Amino acid sequence: MSVRRRWVCALAGVFVMGCCGLNAQQTPATQIENMHWKLTWLPGVKIGSSTPPRAAYIELDSASHRMRGSGGCNTLMGGYELEGDHVKFMAPVRTMMACASGMATEDALIKALDETREWRVSGTKLNLLNAEGHAVARFVAAAQ
């Protein structure tokens, strides 16, 4: 690509596939989908190295538009809608096992998913944001 075309693309702020050399693997949605996101922060909740009996996480499957994960005790699941940097989790649900610990984390995570309207990825970190743009949950990309 010529220097002039790169300058025009950057100046115009155009990030359309094909312009500026982006391909399907580099679109913003692929930064959040098909990754294992381990929970690291929820407002007012202490997150340890793992939430008993396992670490809380989410995964978004681009093929089915389904979210799956764990709140630390129960399995989480549900659909999602993704358009650019906007995401909406559709009625996230969980199995109903009772755990001796970790239920506060799980309840807060379900609430955060309900409130989520946008996402931001910076390096290996994912922030889920509410309608006002405030972080409601933070994750880090991790091996499964």
Image: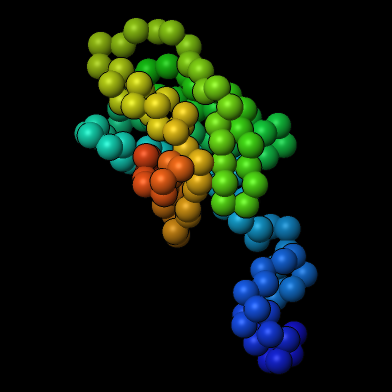
Res 121 visible:
yes
Q: Position of residue 90 (x, y in %)?
A: 58, 27
Task: Identify the residue at image location x=66%, y=58%.
Answer: 27
Residue 61: give x, y in percent of width and height. 64, 36
Picture quadrant where residue 55 is located: top left
Which residue corresponds to the image point at 48% horizontal and 11% vertical from the top-left? Answer: 95
Residue displayed at 37% across by 40% down: 137
Residue 17 vs residue 34: left or right?
right
Can I make out residue 37 in this image?
no
Q: Nearer the viewer, residue 90 or 58?
A: 90
Q: Judge left or right: residue 23 versus residue 54.
A: right
Q: Relative to 82, is 17 above or below?
A: below
Residue nearest the viewer, comparing 129 with 19: 129
Residue 39 in percent (x, y) is at: 37, 37
Relative to residue 61, is residue 25 depicted above or below? below
Residue 132, image x and y in percent?
A: 41, 46
Q: Residue furthest right?
A: 18
Q: Is residue 7 left or right of residue 98?
A: right
Q: Residue at x 68, y 91 (%)?
A: 3
Quadrant for the N terminus in the image: bottom right
Vertical side of 81 occupied by 52: above or below: above
How did the renderer colour the structure?
rainbow
Q: Nearer the viewer, residue 36 or 143?
A: 36
How many badges with numbers are in the image? 0
